[in-house]
Amino acid sequence: MFFALFIYANFTTLGDTHRYLGGATYGSTLWFLNSTEMMDFLAHTLSIFLGPVIANLPFVLLSIYGIYYSVKRLSLNNKELIALLTVLSFPSFGVWTSIASKEAVAVFFLGVVLGFIIDVIKRNPKKNYILVLFSFYLCWLFKPQYLLGIFSVLTFVVISKKLSLKGMGKLILLVIFFMVSLMVLYIMRHEINELSLVMPLHFSLDGGSTRENTIWINDFDVFWNAPYGMFIGFYGPTALEALSKSTHFLAFTESLLILLAFFYAVLKLLLISINTGKLNVYFLGVFLTATLWILFVHYPFGALNPGSAIRYRGGFYAFVVILFYFGYTEVNKQYEFYKLKLYIALN
């Protein structure tokens, strides 16, 4: 928080934090129905009592609790916990979730929602439904587009469990998910296309980091360019942009380290699949059904501006990382059990 306020702020603008603390719409009676007005109300109220610096602290605690709520549902040893928290400790993620920001609130409600998803997967009987419902309300208010990914993964999990699907059944269900997703996109293609063509109007080329729009030029480019857009919307700055600005260089390096860590873990999972002759379709489906939707709905907000990409990524970054690590550790545990059975059989 102090790094963001007193060091990082000297290199770039801290989003809308100053606006929230100033309470641009303070006094609105319907602040609980609008995410921006809610931020204005909460941040300005806190700044009145705590001052403009310490007013950020409750948002720090919110994001910490969101991470804690989901991580504590993972059965991790100390080594695994340190590895996970290391990936969650990159500076840019910390900066945007340690100040009065929508990203800090997003880490909170997505953390609780992810904890609920893990509870459903692991059949944990104790669930804090009041907190979970409140988090779904916040998600609907702040990031309603993320609900597509959340409901997709919950649907995949519930159907798998209700029908007691095995490997092939889960694979068929995953294929059906992709088919239904493509069908939904096709049905909504005109509406999504119209929204994509007006997105560049929300980014000014005078903003310094904004790129020239070469992504959404023709009709339905939002679909044809989605793979690249989803990548750059998550990654942030390109190599050339990283050389032009220190904050971009930091973000570029972080994104590179994140991808290297991800590819290392994926490689280990592939080796496990080769050694066992099996692919864990279930956890693959759990990760893909949520992540692909989130990346798709996120990319229009980050494809034209690397700063916006990194900033908005902070809201769902912990969700994606913890969800992936959950599947990764569960597969690893199954592999260790497989090796133990093999050892006993051979001896």
Image: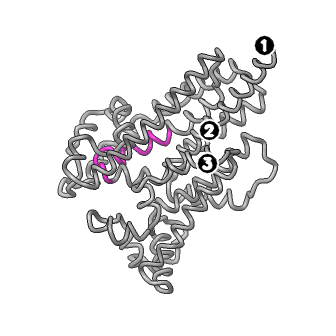
Element assignment for label 2? helix
Q: Residue at x 34, y 39 (%)?
A: 232
Choose the circle earlier in sequence order: 3 or 2. 3
The furthest residue to the front:
347
Image position of 264 with respect to 113: above or below: above
| Residue named by callout 2 | 153
Q: Amino acid at mark 3?
A: Leu
Choose the circle earlier in sequence order: 2 or 1. 2
Mark 3 surroundings: few (<14), some (14-19) or many (≥20) residues within 10 A: some
| Residue named by callout 1 | 346
Image position of 221 with respect to 115: above or below: above
| Residue named by callout 3 | 81
Q: CA distance from mark 2 to mark 1?
A: 39 Å
Instruction: Assign the N terminus to one quadrant of the image.
Output: bottom left
Horizontal placement of 288 versus 120: left or right?
Answer: left
Q: Residue at x 39, y 69 (%)?
A: 17
Q: Residue at x 52, y 47 (%)?
A: 146
